[in-house]
Image (cartoon, grey):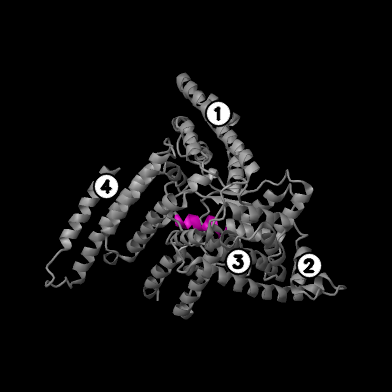
Amino acid sequence: MKATALPALALLLALGACDERPASSPAPTKPEATAASSEVKNAGFEQLSAQMVDDLWKLFPSWAVSEGYYAVADQLQVPDDNYRKQVLDFVKQYRGLFRKIDASQLDSGASSDLSMIRNYLDRLQWQIEKFKAYQWNPAEYNVSATFALILNTDYAPLDERLRTFSRRMEKVPAYYEAAEQSLRTPASPQLVLAIKQNEGALSVFGQELEDKLAASGLSKDEKTKFTQRLIATREAIEDYITFLQTRHAELEKTQKYKNFRIGEKLYEEKFKYDIQIGMGARELYERALKEKARLHDKMTELADKLWPKYFPDQQPPEDRLERISAMLEKLSLHHATKESFKADVEKQIPELAAFVTEHNLLSLDAEKPLVVRTTPPYMRGFAVASINAPGPYDKGANTYFNVMPIADFSDEEAESFLREYNSYLMQILCIHEAIPGHYTQLVYANRSPSLIKSILGNGAMIEGWAVYAERMMLEAGYGDFSPELWLMYYKWNLRTVTNTILDYEIQVKGIDEQRAMELMVKDAFQQKAEAMGKWRRATLSQVQLTSYFAGFADILALREEVKQKLGDKFDLKAFHEKFLSYGSAPIPVIRKLMLEDLPKSQ
């Protein structure tokens, strides 16, 4: 690894030498000289960035595959102490190399890439040396997702992918052995999730795989070796599950689990690295409390307006939260069945695409496939819906819209779920996850000329855009300004705000499940099943739930800022496409780049 960095180091030293001159010598003043110097420095930075990414994929082959980079697909990192030392050596090496670069000498695009790289390297070191989730989060250890991508993505003929699959399986036993050795005392929610998801992981290595192997063109010897490795892989996963189950039984007796709450210091540090919005976690939390009160005011107005229509002979409750809740409960009766839920989600997609195109909100690429599917077993237990999008190296691959399977829910569970994701909120969900939310944003991100901005994507920008898309669509007239849809939208948006409050209060203030349920059910009008799922999610992750509100607020503020600067020349579609053109960069980075470009578009 160190050897590969020598050419870049030599280039940086050479660039530095070219720029040296006595203090008394005047700097070049000709524009063409300055431009040429900037181009040279950008070229040096871009070469070093490309080199870092190459080394990154060698260290993180699973991540590489998720980005569509398959050259290392047959590799599987073994997560032991030696591996973590390699990661820290990587950080030290590239931090030193990038420190030699003067950001002020780069153009704005390269300078913003540099800031993202530096944040990433600092975050990587912090994760290993301070956060240490590898010691207490057994759900970090699961090989199935990358194997599933290799098997189900047509980036190469099936026989070639099966050979890759086979070579990668060779290290699975060592992978899980290292996982067991790395774990100290796990946290309870993460332990339960790890058991569930690794049980689901076995489905990737099941009969369907055996059938594909049997029908393949692999030689007899290749099939024999594949089968041997497959048996060893299954045994390694099963042994890990048994190890976790045994640990769970032991800890249940003593109740000496690692506390899943990370506390204020680690929370603020993680927030700084993950969110990057120019304010701390506590400040965002306080802002969310104020926004919650504002949304209650908005919902009260709409509930009072709708009350005579839906309860003509009934006096409304004096308590405004009770009035809002009663109105929402009435509207929530309009929902799909548990058998039709996935199909109803699929029907929404073309309708949303047609609206976006008709109202000139964004240019959509009809050639980029979006597949609605039931969430695979190895991914269940975390979110109701999610998007799996291809990375910048394989832009034409399918994007999957994962939907929780509910056909096997009990009638009571299904009714609670479907009231939460009723006919109104299903539309908002599809806007958020698909069009023009995550799916659309990630298609644009893959077009970004900056690979760094695509692969080091900022969660607040990604989630913030999806939340912004919900508001933008309703503002454009989606749903014909129906007060019913707007009331449900405010409930959904209140969930976004409550996510921030909930996450901070659980992780920093230490509230218990009872208080969390009260916050979600009473103050945010969520169904019990939804609230229970969110409590579980908030115990499994930290900071991520704040990304929705953080990003949404920043994007709205940026839109208003650009609108004020451009006046009558402001164009909503142009704003959206310019914003998305910068990849998944932090919003403060996008703001700086957009504002610098404004004079060129006036």
Q: Residue at x 52, y 63 (%)?
A: 362
Q: Secondary structure at mark 3?
A: helix
Report the residue marked by disc 2: 326
Kind of residue at disc 4:
Ala
Task: Assess disc 4: are there few (<14), some (14-19) or many (≥20) residues with their C-alpha within 10 Å of its C-alpha.
Answer: some
Closest to the observer, 146 or 576: 146
For marks 4 and 1, the one nearer the N-term is 4
Q: Amino acid at mark 3?
A: Val
Q: Which residue is mark 3?
A: 497
**Which tag is nearer the camera, tag 1 or tag 3?**
1
Where residue 500 appears, as percent x and y from the top left, is 58, 64
> What residue is disc 1 on?
235
Contact check, label 4 and label 2, Cβ < 8 Å: no
- Residue at disc 4, secondary structure: helix
Badge 3 density bin: few <14, some 14–19, many ≥20, Cα 10 Å: many
Magenta stretch containing residue 211, yes or no?
A: no
Look at the numbered disc 1 and give the secondary structure of its residue. helix
The image shows residue 386, relative to residue 555, as above or below, that is above
Is residue 441 within the magenta segment?
yes
Q: Secondary structure at mark 2?
A: helix
Residue 56 lies, with reference to residue 335, above or below; the image says above
Are the residues tagged 1 and 2 within 8 Å (C-beta)?
A: no
Q: How far is mark 1 from mark 3, CA to CA? A: 44 Å
Residue closer to the observer: 328 or 425: 328
**Separation (CA) of disc 3 from disc 4:** 44 Å
Q: Which residue is mark 4?
A: 5
